[in-house]
Image (spheres, rainbow, N blue to C red):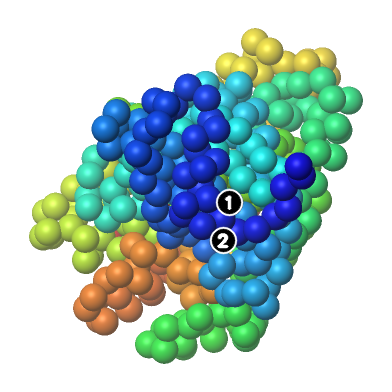
Amino acid sequence: MTTTYRPLTEQEAIEIARTIEGIFPEGADLKSREIGDGNLNLVFHITDPASGSSLIMKQALPYAKVVGESWPLTLDRARIESESLILQNKLAPGLVPQVYRYDAALALTVMEDLSSHVIMRRGLMDTIDYPLFADHISTFLARTLFLTSDLGMNQQEKKLLVRDFINPELCKITEELIFDDPYTDAETNNIPAPIRDAVEAIWQDGELQFEVALLRQKFLTSAEALLHGDLHTGSIFITPESTKVIDPEFAYYGPMGFDIGAVIGNLLLNFAAQEHWSSDADARARYRTNLLTMIESIWTQFETKFRALWNEQSVDRLASAAPGYQDFYMKRLLQDTIGFAGCKMVRRVYGLAHVADIDAITDETVREKAQRLALAIGTALIRGNRQAETIGHVIDIVKKEGF
Ligand SMILES: Nc1ncnc2c1ncn2[C@@H]1O[C@H](COP(=O)(O)OP(=O)(O)O)[C@@H](O)[C@H]1O
Ligand SMILES: CSC[C@H]1O[C@H](OP(=O)(O)O)[C@H](O)[C@@H]1O
């Protein structure tokens, strides 16, 4: 019998969970709860309280949940997500959840339950330290980006991957919500009234918009590597010892700096919000310093690992032989990273989808201060991206804008 698509109920999710081999004991009394808190999909948490076994079922809806049925969205994103997770697990073992099953008809991915971890955005709001994160995420980024690029894999096979990960509808969301709508009076924007003046100044800023247009062009045309495509701190599960990247439904072949910039931009959004989350001025200064050290370390470790892969595993003779090419490439990648980090910050302050780091700030004055700081840092990163020589450029901007 062929299954036809329908959004699952909690009970139907249990029936499917029973058919996944090797997770639950025969006849287990399974519990099911829909826990999706993202913008797009249903997520069922299935548990057997007796054995402690569990799994996650993520199902795509045929529309964007955050907006409703008026915004139809392809179910193919579930295939993109499950195939990306499987590939990422090969390239960066242990840094993503294990996929148990993908069901195309139901647009359903069944995967490892990571409830022992917390969503990193929540962890940062609780001012937890993650000393191994820079090491883990730089490994994830260096390996997934290098090994899916023309530098690190067979260039004909790469073209087939580009084809398999064509993701036009999800890319359109990014093209509009990150690279277009925030720079005009678009209906999708969700502008906090107290910062309207700062937003209108951005709409008048031609130099800024020129830089955004250059970054947007890269997002539209640079098929450098298979990106995660939405690598914010809500897409990372974490503990002080372990990091797991989830939710790659926006995966496509794009510019590498977009993924690295997403991580850095989201850490800086949390930096801007620390006025609220830290318990006092000393704690705030310490946590903010840690965030900046983490950002520096993510880039420097990424660069070291990416260069090592290049020196040891490159498949591109000319890229390895041409004097100065690797240095030129890394500098351009740093500049892209900084520009994309800025774009990621700006959209999360007054675009369609905000971040809890800032929106959950209860005091209106503190929230406005965080919003203005995030905009000041984000726009400065965009403006100066093509002048950056080192990651110190980011740290200098942050210190200048508001420490
Ligand atoms: N593998 C997992 N283990 C445990 N919880 C998960 C897992 N995947 C998703 N979740 C939960 O579901 C939420 C939404 O998942 P996410 O993949 O971000 O969905 P969306 O694509 O709708 O944003 C996460 O914030 C997390 O709470
Ligand atoms: C209309 S989708 C808005 C926004 O939501 C996605 O994030 P997530 O699925 O992780 O909640 C993505 O960032 C989109 O830009």
Q: Residue 309: x, y in percent? A: 62, 17
Q: Is residue 156 visible?
A: yes
The answer to whether residue 389 is above or below residue 153 is: below
Q: Earlier in the sequence, mark 2 or mark 1?
A: 2
- Residue placed most toward the observer, 111 or 290: 111
The crowd level at tag 1 (other Cα within 10 Å; few <14, some 14-19, many 20+) is: many
Q: How many numbered marks, from 0 up?
A: 2
For ligand 1, tell me if the residue under mark 2 lies within 8 Å: yes
Q: Which residue: 21% across, 66% down?
A: 276
Extreme right residue here? 156
The answer to whether residue 373 is above or below residue 93 is: below
Residue placed under numbered mark 2 in the picture: 40
> Could you tell whether 162 is left or right of 391 in the image?
right
The crowd level at tag 2 (other Cα within 10 Å; few <14, some 14-19, many 20+) is: some
The answer to whether residue 175 is above or below residue 33 is: below
Mark 1 belongs to which amino acid?
Answer: Gln
Quarter of the figure that contains the N terminus: top right
Quarter of the figure that contains the C terminus: bottom left
The answer to whether residue 309 is above or below residue 161 is: above
- Residue placed most toward the observer, 146 or 402: 146
Q: Marks 2 and 1, Cα distance to the nearest angstrom? A: 9 Å
Mark 2 vs 1: CB contact within 8 A: no
Q: Residue 52: x, y in percent? A: 29, 31
Q: Residue 85: x, y in percent? A: 59, 34
Q: Regarding mark 1 in the picture, which secondary structure is present there?
A: strand
User: Which circle marks residue 59 in the picture?
Assistant: 1
Extreme top residue here? 312
Q: Which residue: 38% across, 87% down?
A: 194
Q: Tell me where residue 183 sits by quadrant.
A: bottom right
